[in-house]
Amino acid sequence: MIALAILVVAAFLLFVITLWKRRSPAHLREIPAFTKLTHAVGLSIEDGKRLHVSLGHGSLLDARGGSALAGLALLRSVAERTSVSDMPSVASAGDAALGLLTQDTLQAGYQAAGVEDAYVHTMGRVTGLTPFSYAAGAMQIPQNENVSTNIIIGHVSSEAGLMTDAAERNNIKLIGASDNLAGQSVLFVNTEDPLIGEELFAAGAYLNSDPTHAASLTVQDIFRWLIILALLGGAAAKFVGVL
């Protein structure tokens, strides 16, 4: 019941704040990684090179699904912007359901750009169904397909080291974020401007003009402060002997 109540409140707040954001544009703080990603998209089109979006191997049926959905939001924007390029973006996933959604998201990006006929289903791929087989398959894409920037966003763990090493050896720019602590550690030491913590879930807001994405950040902030206040209230109640 508590989880359902939280879900209902979050949905209501998202609806209300989205309406508000439509009237008042969002003012987001600068995150260097997203600034570089925006530049990388433009440069890839000019240079005739690809972007590779690695969505990790998170399942959509458990807690790892949040990071996968955040990666799909980023992929949707990247696909739309690079659909006119001679070397369109490609994406890889390590889960069967996520792989299907990857192809669907890429196709939606092409539809939004008005070039649906240019879409090819092999742009979205499942490179392996275990963490290391996924990484082993994904690391081949930057090496062999003229990739200028590798974007790792989703649930990845220590196997991300294989992909970051491949990017470094081929002088490929790397942008990364993970909801896994081991994955965050690997990406933190291998990227110039790592995305930390909840910054992973801000991808849609920074790359998409849809006010729903900006509203979702505000909802996250509201619940974050509610959790902080609950923790402080609980500590105070314990201190005075109420609990």
Image (spheres, rainbow, N blue to C red):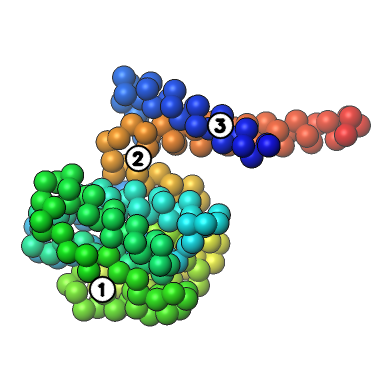
**Could you say which quadrant of the image residue 123 lies in?**
bottom left
**Could you say which quadrant of the image residue 134 lies in?**
bottom left
- The amino acid at mark 1 is Pro
Local secondary structure at mark 3: helix
The C terminus sits in image quarter: top right
Between tags 1 and 3, which lies in front? 3
Query: Decide: marks 1, 2 in contact (CB < 8 A)?
Result: no
Q: CA distance from mark 1 to mark 3?
A: 42 Å
| Residue matched to label 1 | 142
Earlier residue among tags 2 and 3: 3
Local secondary structure at mark 2: helix
Image coords of residue 86 (percent x, y): 8, 62
With 47 as the anchor, is 11 left or right in this view? Answer: right
Residue occupying the point 44% across, 74% down: 129
| Residue matched to label 3 | 8
Between tags 2 and 3, which lies in front? 3
